[in-house]
Amino acid sequence: MSTAPELPHPSPAHLPTLAELRVQIDALDQQLLSLVNQRARVAEQVGEVKRREGSPFFRPDRVAQVIEKIEKANPGPLKNEHVAAIWREIMSACLALESPQRVAILGPAGTFCEQAALEYFGSAAEFMYCANFDEVFQATAAGSAQYGVVGVENSVEGVVTRSLDLFLHTPTHVVGEVSLLVRHNLMRLVNALEGIEVVMAHPQALAQCQAWLSKHLPHAERRPVASNAEGARLAASNPAWAALASERAASNFGLHIVSHAVQDDAYNRTRFAIIALPETLATPPVSGQDCTSLVVSVPNRPGAVHDLLVPLKTHGVSMTRFESRPARTGQWEYYFYIDLAGHASEPHVAKALQELRELCAFYKVLGSYPVASV
């Protein structure tokens, strides 16, 4: 396979003209295009082998390995995060030749859920836009989509309770996650802050911007909608309405961004889970930076919750999240959602889980998967 020759660095006195540099760039672009298509042809052969063997087409652990290898070999001047983004798109396009991946996400186009899906799957994936997270779970569980992306936790407002409830009885499991830096922008048809009567967004977004809204738009109605992008779509129909959404949503619906980044916390992040049926993608292998999520309930007796912690301490397993949700039995019983540091197949985690299970009236592992980079 041919590679582009390394170009010498000319002295300022012999700097090529702009026209000459553009000729060099055009030639390099042709070489890049040829090499990328060579890679795509090999990827098509990989797809045939996977189809013959019955192997999964999308392997997020393989994507991570390739990007890590590329980053280590990167000589610059491109930054590693930019190289990673380029290679993720190349791999996404090649995967689409092997087998297009259908991904259920919260719609319409322009949601932060879509942005998380783009970061994980690349833009060559086929997105199925859903009205709510219930539909995302249903589409993934029914096989209409091979994967789903759902919000599970925000750094300001805490867990997305509906997602936790839906995890309880779904046959899907978590195979990955994305941690997204969220910037809420105020947008409307009119490029002015005056005259806004209604601000629409997902309830979580309204809560994440409540201090800013109270200061700058104290008399505007705060109207919750299914998603931020849905708020942007509605705001495009009335000049007195505004939405809190992404820059992508503003572009999609032809809105002016009146104020950028109005969230109360500058480091506002949302965590999204990637879900799939086990037959679509099995539990990812150990990566060295993993999380195991589970949901349990315990008999209603003194010390039962305390006893859950004993196996974790005994085997040196760190608990990174602990949330409770009502069991809705009318008996004041609860389900506990727990995140543990480590992979379920690691010996110390496996021993802790085995002992933990014996203490539980209900026990379900939601998934073991690589932790998202922040």
Image (spheres, rainbow, N blue to C red):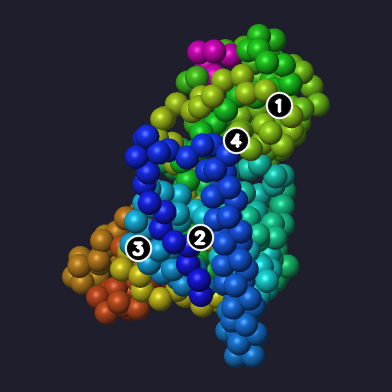
Q: Which mark is residue 73?
A: 3
The disc, 2 or 1, on the residue closer to the chain's N-terminal end is: 2
For the view shown, which residue lies furthest in the bottom direction?
53
Verify whether residue 222 appears in magenta.
no
Instruction: Look at the image and give the residue range highlighted in magenta.
Output: 213-217
Asked whether 297 or 166 is in front, the reply is: 166
The disc, 2 or 4, on the residue closer to the chain's N-terminal end is: 2
What secondary structure is marked by label 1?
loop
For the view shown, which residue lies furthest in the right direction?
237
**Residue at screen point 52% across, 43% down:** 21
Q: Amino acid at mark 3?
A: Ala
Verify whether residue 214 appears in magenta.
yes
Q: Quick check: marks 1 and 3 in contact, CB under 8 Å?
A: no
Badge 1 crowding class, 10 Å Cα cut-off, few under 14, some 14 to 19, many 20 or more, is many
The residue under label 4 is: 246
What secondary structure is marked by label 4?
loop
The residue under label 1 is: 255
Viewer-nearest of discs 1 and 3: 3
Viewer-nearest of discs 4 and 3: 3
